[in-house]
Image (spheres, rainbow, N blue to C red):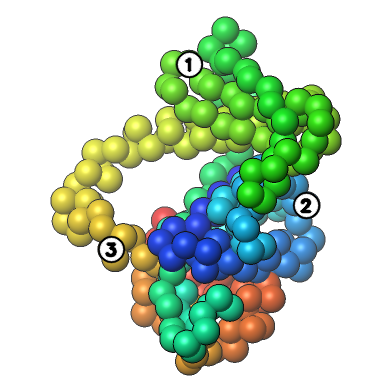
Amino acid sequence: MESIIIEIRAGTGGEEAALFAEDLYRMYSKYADRQGFKQNVLDINPSELGGIKEIIFEVKGENVFSLFKNEAGVHRVQRVPKTEKGNRIHTSTASVAILPKPTEAQISIKPSDIKMDFYKSSGPGGQNVNKRQTAVRITHLPTGLVVTSQTERSLEDNKRAALSILQARLFERENSAQQNKLLQERRAQIGSAERAEKIRTYNFPQDRLTDHRVEKSWHNLDKIMDGHLEKIIEHLNTHLKN
């Protein structure tokens, strides 16, 4: 059984982007449930109105990376936000990263290479929700990478969660370094603007999801956002070469 770590971050669009990030998390979580995968939230930063500024969660299951790998990139939503009184359509974005979780044999972290800080976990608006210091911040000294976890009740569980995030990011960084020349060549050809990175648009007024990499659209967004991604993922895995 393999594991991946999914990171979803709100992009441009303020609170509406955070609400869209929450919608994406719910969509992937329900899809994972439909596949019988196990899930565990490692860290979450909620927004004021019930959205998510950032969430990091682990998904475990057979062939989980091959099913989720094509979800990485910038997702765009077009809809009338709940916060909009004038019925105007807004465009917002959220980014999705899919990281294969390495084994300890693939990525080992020396205790001397990390600095741990402990603090009180906080909820929306920054208020402390825990009187004890159970949240963990880990700094990887050689690279400067910083990860946090505050979702678990105990300090030890948050330490384990933060180390899992750090391992995945170091593994991804190592793989990225090997592919850096190819990436630089690709950026020279297509640019690195968000417009070029956008992989998908969720157009709610037209009830349509369009994946720009394969130039194909699917309808019935409510069903898709409820985790029914099987047809989309199957089509992408058939037509995209990774």
Residue 194 in the image: above or below residue 80: above
| Residue 82 visible (yes or no) | yes
Rendered-image quadrant of the C terminus: bottom left
Q: Nearer the viewer, residue 88 or 239?
A: 88
List x then y, in percent, for residue 64. Answer: 64, 54
Q: Nearer the viewer, residue 133 or 8?
A: 133
List x then y, in percent, for residue 37. Answer: 76, 56
Q: Amino acid at mark 2?
A: Lys
Which residue is painted at 56% across and 53% down in the image?
53
List x then y, in percent, for residue 69. Answer: 52, 56
Q: Nearer the viewer, mark 2 or mark 3?
A: 3
Q: Which residue is mark 3?
A: 196
Q: Which residue is mark 1?
A: 141
For this orientation, the residue located farthest to the bottom is 206
Mark pair 2, 1: CA separation: 32 Å
List x then y, in percent, for residue 229. Answer: 62, 73
Q: Any mark on residue 38, and which? A: 2
Q: Amino acid at mark 3?
A: Ala
When asked about the image quadrant of residue 189, the answer is bottom left
When asked about the image quadrant of residue 166, the answer is top right
* Pointer 2 or 1: first along the chain: 2
Q: Nearer the viewer, mark 1 or mark 3?
A: 1
Rendered-image quadrant of the N terminus: top right
Mark pair 2, 3: CA separation: 33 Å
Q: Are marks 1 and 3 in contact (CB under 8 Å)?
A: no
Image side of residue 55 versus residue 185, left or right: right
